[in-house]
Image (cartoon, grey):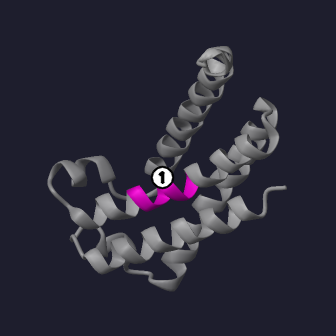
Amino acid sequence: MFDPVINSLPAFAGFFATAVVLLAVFAALYLFATPYSEVKLIREGNTAAAISLAGALLGYALPIAVAVVVSHDFYVMIGWGVVACVVQLLVYVAARLALPQINLAIPQGKVASGIFLAALSVVAGILNAGCIA
């Protein structure tokens, strides 16, 4: 009964570990790209920062998950991880163009800005994931 699961564990572990590494690299790049420290703000209880970062992480993770389901190939997953990273960083740039004060609003705890950025990130992630063939 559990043989298929047990036999799949090595592949699961490999894909999961690779996905976690990709997510960590994306998070580091995203945190570097923003002019404020989301981690520090979240530790201080800033809801806007938590929402915006959560949206970016979700928006990034969605295409990674779809890439694994569609391809079952590490290199394809990594390639889509690079694409998803670029897309999410461009979403942040677009949000700053649409709302130039967003880089001030999130550190100030303005939740509407955090929700807006999170929504853009998740929407871009869904579209990105949906376009993976």
Quadrant housing residue 111 = bottom left
Name of the residue lying farthest toward the left: 44
Quadrant housing residue 128 = bottom right
Q: Can residue 33 be seen in this view?
A: no
Name of the residue lying farthest toward the right: 133
Q: Is residue 99 left or right of residue 90?
A: left
Q: At x 20% / y 61%, what residue is drawn?
A: 46
Residue 16 horizontal/vertical position (percent):
58, 29
The N terminus - image quarter: top right
Residue 50 horizontal/vertical position (percent):
30, 58
The C terminus - image quarter: bottom right
Q: At x 67% / y 20%, what residue is drawn?
A: 4
Of residue 119 and residue 113, the one placed in the foreground of this image is: 119
Neighbourhood count class around disc 1 (C-alpha, 10 Å): few under 14, some 14–19, many 20 upward: many
Residue 24 horizontal/vertical position (percent):
50, 36
Name of the residue lying farthest toward the front: 1
Dot 1: element:
helix
Residue extent of the magenta highlight: 54-60
What residue is shown with label 1? 57
Q: In this view, does 66 lie to the left or right of 76?
A: left
Residue 55, magenta (yes or no): yes
* Total numbered labels placed on residues in the image: 1
Residue 11 horizontal/vertical position (percent):
68, 21
Is residue 112 placed above or below 18 in the rendered structure? Answer: below
Is residue 89 placed above or below 27 in the rendered structure? Answer: below
Residue 23, magenta (yes or no): no
Is residue 116 placed above or below 47 in the rendered structure? Answer: below
Q: At x 63% / y 51%, what residue is drawn?
A: 85
Of residue 84 and residue 7, the one placed in the foreground of this image is: 7
